Image: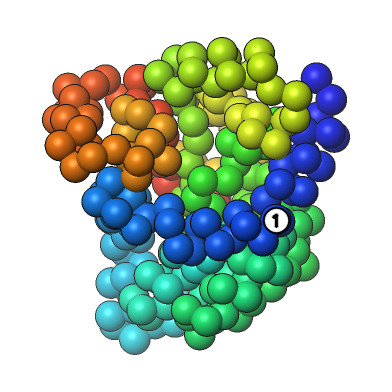
Amino acid sequence: MNNKKWIQEKKEGYTKRKVALYYDKKRFSNYGGRYVDNKEKAIVTSYLKDELSSIARGKKVSLLDVPCGTGRFAVLFSNKGFNVTAADYSQDMLDITAKRAKVKLVKCDAYNMPFKKGKFDVVVSIRFLFHYPNPENILKELVRVTKNGGILVFCTLNKYSVRYFIEIILDLFRKSKEHKLKFVTEKELNEKIKNLGVKILTTESMFVIPTQMYGKLPKFMVKFFMFIEKFTPDNLKILRYWKVSKK
């Protein structure tokens, strides 16, 4: 598999203006979309409870949101008092974020960011790593810009979840790698990041069907899958959310 082609097609697809408009207007606009949005925001917020306590005591806490997309998390973090820098490869995404949140905006490639080593107390990267063939390379850069003792929050796609098998079938018919995804087990990622100088603090998995499907289903079906999720083993759920600290 040509990883350079995979990466290039991902970037080209992501920077299309219609993608930014879809993210901003439609993806989280109905019952199912709001369920996904609220659940993700809740888990990330819970991972940053110590930092929120520090902010409440008057301490300034810097946070990098990368990629920020249309500002979904940048708005959340800014409203909670973080000193937010929102970075993205897409200018259209940044333009929309600028209308929603008063944060510092930086256009950059996550593989090579223009920030000094150890700049941020917190780095958050949601719905990103699994789009690329070598998530450990991006994680290395995310760790680089995190302060010693700082927190990094990110998510991966669980191998052997329902979506894993769906994507195997879909890949048979795809000509482009724009929608190609990378799946890993918890053990596999542990192996990939063990030399990055981080300590895994906690992980938790969520969702039993692809997240975009929640926004396309009627309310009663969304509630059905919410019920199913309660009894689904963690490793079979689709998205795993990680909280790690830089040593």
Q: How many marks?
A: 1
Q: In the figure, residue 226 lies in which quadrant?
A: top left
Residue identified by numbered label 1 = 16
Q: Is residue 38 left or right of residue 168?
A: left
Q: In the figure, residue 16 lies in which quadrant?
A: bottom right
In which quadrant is the N terminus drawn?
top right
The residue at 50%/35% (across/down) is 156
* Residue 92 in view: yes
The chosen color scheme is: rainbow
- Estimate the x, y position of residue 206 in percent, counting from the top left: 32, 35
- Estimate the x, y position of residue 139 in percent, counting from the top left: 64, 44
Q: Is residue 99 left or right of residue 196?
A: left
- Estimate the x, y position of residue 65 in percent, counting from the top left: 54, 63
Q: Is residue 158 above or below residue 242?
A: above
The residue at 42%/46% (across/down) is 243
Q: In the figure, residue 82 lies in which quadrant?
A: bottom left
Nearest to the observer: residue 165 or residue 194: 165
Q: Amino acid at mark 1?
A: Lys
- Estimate the x, y position of residue 138 in percent, counting from the top left: 68, 45
The residue at 28%/80% (across/down) is 56
Nearest to the observer: residue 197 or residue 25: 25
